Each structure stands twice: as C-alpha cells, then as structure tokens.
Image (tube, rainbow, N blue to C red):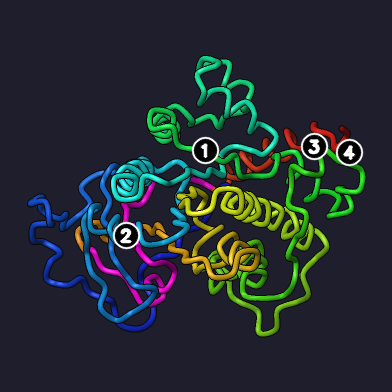
Amino acid sequence: MRARTMNRLAGAGFALLLSSCASGPGPTGAALPTSLPDLTSYALIHTDAGRRQARHVSVDEAARVLAGFDVIFIGEAHQHPGNHMAEMALLRAIYARAPNVSLSLEQFERDVQPVLDDYLAGKMGETPFTEKARAWSNYTTSYRPLVEFAKDHKLPVIAANAPEKFIRCVGREGTGFFARLKPEQRLWAAAELNLQDGPYRDKFLGFVGGDAGHGGDGAKEKPAVRPPPSETALRSFAAQVTRDDTMAESIALHLQKNPGRKVVHINGSFHSADFLGTVERLTMRATGLKVAVVNPEFADDPNSLEVTPQVAKAGTFTLLMRQLPDFYATDEEMSAAVKKQIEARNRNTCEF
C-alpha cells in the first residue's frame, strides 16, 4: 500500500514516557532532540516491542541494537523528508557495524532487477536507469541517497516488489490473473500468496472499510457487527498480499543465496507495522530469523516526544516525526483526486 493513515498517538491508557536520557547527550556527545522543530526532524524511541520503559536513543545506539538482527524493516511515510533522512542515517550506521548488509526496496520491482544491477555495476547512467527501472517520482530526493550509498560500498540492492501492473490487475480480476502470465512473467511475483484469515487481513479490511480500530477513519462509527467483506475488498486484499508476499519471498531468496548477510528493507509502514504484512510472511518462509521493525508514527504534539502502549507495540523502534500537511483541504479536492486516479487506472489494461 503506497499510503497509510498513520495511527495518532492519542489513545486509551497511559503514555510510555521517555527515560531521563531524552534530553541528555548521546554516546557521541550529541544532544538528543527534545522536540520536532521541522519536517526533517525525527526522534528514535527504543520501544522493545511494547515493554513499559521506552527509551529515547541516538542513531548510533539504535544501529548497535539493529546490527544484531538478520533483517531490519524500516517503515516509511513515502513522502516524508524526516523519514528519508532517518533511513539514510540508519543504513549508514548499520553498515558501519555490519558491512555484510544488503539493501532491499519496495520501490523497485522484480522485473527490473537486471537494470538495477547494471546501474550498480556502472554500466549505465542515472537517467536511463531511472527510466528503465520505472523509478518512483520522488526517487532523486528520497531513494537516490540509499542507492548511491549501496553503489559506493558495493552492496547488493534487491528489487523486492511485484510489478505495479500485477498489483492493479489482481485488484481488478483477483488471483486468477496469474494464470494468464507466461512462466517467466509469473516469477515476478511470489509463488505462494497468504490470503488466510488473521490479524493482518482484519487490519487491512478495516482500513479499506474505514474502521478506526483497524487504521481507518475515526470519524466513522464502527458497526456492532461487521458485514462480510465485498468481493472488491477481497480482491484489494489479494493485491496487497501480492506485494507483501513478493517482498518477503525476495528477501528470503536473497538470504538463501547469501548466507550470513543481513538485509535492511524499506517499505511503506503498513507492510511492517505490528510485525504483520511482509514481516510475518518473511518469518513464515524463513523461520528462526531475527527481525526488527522501525515503525514511523506522527506526533500529535511536536514538543512532546512520548508514545502510547499501542504505538510502542508496533515496532522494535518507533520513529517519531511531525505530521505532514493535509493532502487535501476539502472533500471536493479529495474526490477530484480519487476520480483522476480511477480514470488513469481504467485506461490501463491487464493484457501482456
């Protein structure tokens, strides 16, 4: 999912207050932030997946912990500058402690792996690379630093995702779409999709249905009994799972071929929050992996760095950032944007 309504920090129960080191110097002498003054700001909170004592840490402290994991998921709000600053800082610091790390990206799709490899090997320039690899529109500002760091240090980069056209066609036709693909094309998505009932399915269907308890719109009243999901919602979940399972399989295959390596994987936060989505699908494929999640959240108050128990449980670390501006000021603006997206999607076909 390329967008996520972030969980707000106000919630039932007590707040997990930061320890006294929140305003003190870090291990390198740099003072830890006590507020989020602008959109490039962020704070890292070691939540230990929900333990009562949350601890505000520096990037170096976080990297020391994360370097002990096999796979580190860093969730993101795709357009947030602070999120991308934190990703680069964490990758650099993790590499300093674990140089045998590979970078994995939701933002590139499996079929362009040869193009990505050629660019990393210096066989093409950046402009033809971004064109042939179908780089996201914010590549140069958001993902270029990560890829260039990998290129400079000769780190593998995994084009982890399924092709966007696959996602769109599964959302339109369901998983029967895969039967029409050529054998070589079918390899661009996970061989096995996990569509079963469970917390992630409930969360996703709640999201698309506007259930605040599952990440949807809190302004909508939850029904006493949730109606069965529509066929459209189930196809949407199948499309979502195609992303999750493909990214998980891509990481698992890379680790099988490269024993002893670690992986830093970047994806939209919905794919890894609460250790669900891509995370649980990876651990299904590779039991015994030690997996960490850095989960981004928007602060209600940029001058108060605290998290609730619900937020703390969503990751090994919480990456706290300022709220982004409202994408749309009115319902009319939002409706116009959605209509434009639907029209563009309908112009595309599912023929190969």
Contact (CB < 8 A) between labels 1 and 2? no
Helix, strand or loop status at disc 2: loop
The amino acid on which the numbered mark 1 sits, given as a three-letter code, is: Val
Residue type at numbered disc 4:
Lys
Q: Which numbered disc covers residue 346?
A: 3
Contact between marks 3 and 1 (CB within 8 A): the answer is: no
Could you say whether the residue bearing mark 3 is in a helix, strand or loop? Answer: helix
Q: Is residue 232 above or below residue 205?
A: above
Q: Main secondary structure of the magenta part?
A: loop
Question: For numbered disc 1, what is the local secondary structure?
Answer: strand
Q: Magenta stretch?
A: 305-330
Distance between mark 3 and mark 1 Cα atoms? 32 Å
According to the image, label 1 marks what residue? 157
Please name which of the two marks, 3 or 1, marks the residue nearer to the observer.
1
For mark 4, what is the residue?
A: 182
Crowding around mark 4 (Cα neighbors within 10 Å: few <14, some 14 to 19, many 20+) is few
Q: Where is residue 190 in the image (x, y as percent from the top left)?
A: 73, 52
